[in-house]
Image (cartoon, rainbow, N blue to C red):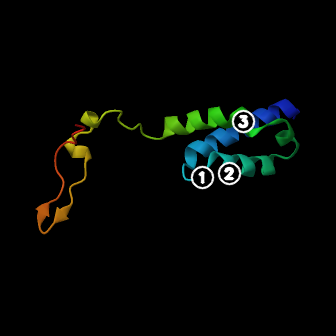
């Protein structure tokens, strides 16, 4: 295989691992993949693929609400404190 194909395969592998392993840092995933890629890793820098791996990870993870009003009561956790619900309802930002 040519170096360009191996380069693209390594970038794709980094993106897949970023989506599948959200607990590992993007830098750690890059380091592991470049170690395994051999000569193909010589032409790839972390800054070159950081954005694409971050985007792939964000697509995989659920989105967070931008406003407190977007959080519904059924998505919130209810905890019991002395036999009564400790938290219930919506969050006020004011």
Q: Residue furthest top?
A: 4
Quadrant in which residue 80 is drawn: bottom left
Q: Residue at x 81, y 46 (%)?
A: 37
Q: Are marks 1 and 2 in contact (CB under 8 Å)?
A: yes
Describe residue 58's horizontal placement relative to residue 53 as left or right. left
- Residue 69 screen position, x and y as percent: 24, 34
Q: Measure the C-alpha gap from mark 3 to mark 1.
A: 17 Å
Residue appearing at x 22%, y 37% in the figure: 94
Percent coordinates x, y for residue 8 in the rendering: 76, 33
The percent position of residue 33, horizontal first and vertical second, equals 74, 48
For disc 1, the neighbor class at 10 Å (few under 14, some 14 to 19, many from 20) is: few
Callout in the foreground (3, 1): 3
Marks 3 and 2: in contact by CB < 8 Å?
Answer: no
Residue 28 numbered mark, or none: 2
Q: Which residue is mark 1?
A: 24
The vertical placement of 23 against 58, above or below, is: below
């Amino acid at each position: 295989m040519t170096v360009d194909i191996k380069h693209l395969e390594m970038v794709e592998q980094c993106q897949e691992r970023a989506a599948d392993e959200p607990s590992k840092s993007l830098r750690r995933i890059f380091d592991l993949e470049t170690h395994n890629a051999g000569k193909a890793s010589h032409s790839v820098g972390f800054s070159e693929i950081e954005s694409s791996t971050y985007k792939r990870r964000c697509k995989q993870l659920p989105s967070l609400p931008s406003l407190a009003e977007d959080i519904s009561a059924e998505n919130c956790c209810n905890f019991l404190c002395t036999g009564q619900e400790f938290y219930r309802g919506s969050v006020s930002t004011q």
